[in-house]
Image: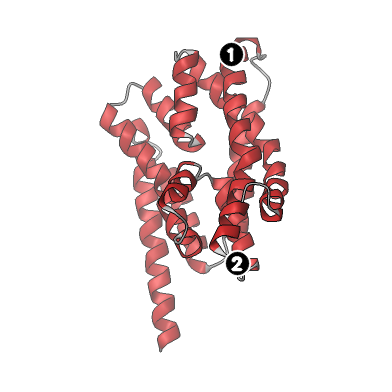
Amino acid sequence: MAFSKDFWQGVRDGTPFILVILPFGAVFGVVATEAGLNLAQVMGFSVLVIAGAAQFVAVQMMVDNAPVLIVLAASLAVNLRMAMYSASLAPHLGKISWWQRGVVSYFMVDQAYAASILKYEQTPDMTPQRKMSYYFGVITPICPVWYLATWAGAALGTAVPAGLPIDFAVPITFLALIVPMLRTLAHVAAAMVSILGVLVFAFLPFNLGLLLAALLAMMAGAEVERRLALRRQA
């Protein structure tokens, strides 16, 4: 598994993501340090949580002195997409061993999912072991760089010029991931509702608008999918 051609193909497909992972991780390290976290706490965030978007949300809400339950709820809402990723990958990786599924679950990041699900759909004859090998290949250049970038941002954050626009990596990362995945009307509907929801509920304290927007987006996507399914059966 470790050094198969599928593994190395995954490494090659995952390597371009370094261009956004580096500044993304560095930005989190800087932001978390400025929020008052020490180096160990920042690294604990990135190693234990390993969820960039949720980490940004949690740190911002902590700075705003939001209640712990609100911080946890908002972070969970942001990470609910991981449950959808897992459900999408289950038909492909469900037959690998339990400990391998555990490793895949820990390293479930947006970039790895986006690259892997595309590969699996394009190559339906891959065995579960080959698919797992490819997945591990994709995360090999991504996750270590995330850790290192976070450490660099936290350790060197005070040396970064205040006007340096490194935070561009955050929206670019998600645009690069989300746009190619908007392949159905349900996906587009969920994306549009989430955008509108965040704007409409921006006045709510503690970023509670994010929770409402995520809930409405999931409901909209599910409803559109249900209506499309009924139309296909008619």
Figure quadrant of residue 74: top left
Q: Mark 2 or mark 1: name the one nearer the start of the chain.
A: 2
Image quarter of the C terminus: bottom left
Q: Farthest residue in the bottom direction?
A: 234
In the depicted view, which residue is nearer to us: 60 or 111? Answer: 111
The residue sitting at 38% across, 35% down in the picture is: 207
In the depicted view, which residue is nearer to us: 24 or 112? Answer: 112
Q: Amino acid at mark 1?
A: Ala
- Secondary structure, mark 1, is helix
The residue sitting at 51% across, 68% down in the picture is: 185
Residue holding disc 1:
155
- Secondary structure, mark 2, is helix
Tell me the tag on residue 121. Answer: 2
Question: Residue 64's x, y, as percent?
Answer: 37, 22
Q: Amino acid at mark 2?
A: Glu
Tell me the tag on residue 137. Answer: none
Contact (Cβ within 8 Å) of mark 2 with mark 1: no
In the depicted view, which residue is nearer to us: 168 or 19? Answer: 19
